[in-house]
Amino acid sequence: MPSLIEKTPCEGLLPVSSAGVTLSECAPARMTSVSPFAGKERATGTALKAMGLGWPKPGQSFATDRASIIWTGRDQAFLVGAAPEGLAETAALTDQSDAWARLRLEGSGAEAVLARLVSLDLRISAFPRGRVARTGLNHMMMILCRVDKTGFDIMVFRSMAETAVHELHQAMKANAARAAAL
């Protein structure tokens, strides 16, 4: 019988750093898709408040020290880092833990790196902490969340992890080369 070895989506690929920007893999965490049943939006929000969170509006996320809820689309959010306690009666729940790669891009040049690949205004004034966008990372879909002044969480499908790391690392090196030339 074959023995399977559990690996994270970016095993052996990360971390990488260039010119003060670091791309790393977020620690594995439970991730659950939450979609409230019709008429149960308020009850879902109440259950999330018991965890110190709330139901996110489009483009919004909430986080505590142990968990976060990230808007991911119409009537859908991802609960990360916590069990979906109290939500089974109010929402459709789907385990997404192994389906996504979660990356962290951080450093003073993180916005400039993403500017090469993402067609959004990511300045802190336009995309503040807690803001979320479902957008393209060059040619692949991603969920982007600003976590602090110089940091972003990036989620891509697990099958696209290596490509995402490659694209981001190339953009990091290009920004470092440009800074060195100035």
Image (tube, rainbow, N blue to C red):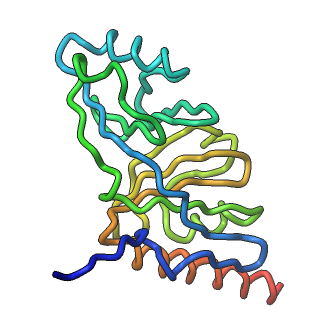
Tell me the quarter of the picture where residue 87 sits. top left
144 in relation to 34, above or below: below
- Residue 51, horizontal then vertical, whole percent: 50, 22
Query: Of residues 67 and 115, which is closer to you in this image?
Result: 67
Q: Image point 78% across, 72% down: which residue?
A: 20
Q: Pick the quarter of the image with the C terminus.
A: bottom right
Choose between 165 and 57: the one closer to the eye. 165
Tell me the quarter of the image containing the N terminus. Answer: bottom left
Residue 161 % position (x, y): 40, 72
Residue at position x 35%, y 52% in the image: 97
The image position of residue 22, as x and y in percent, is: 68, 70
Where is residue 130, by image quadrant?
top right
Instruction: Give the residue at x 37% y 24%.
Output: 85
Residue 50 horizontal side relative to residue 111, left or right: left
Identify the residue at horizontal 31%, vertical 38% (top origin).
73
Residue 11 against residue 181 in the figure, above or below:
above
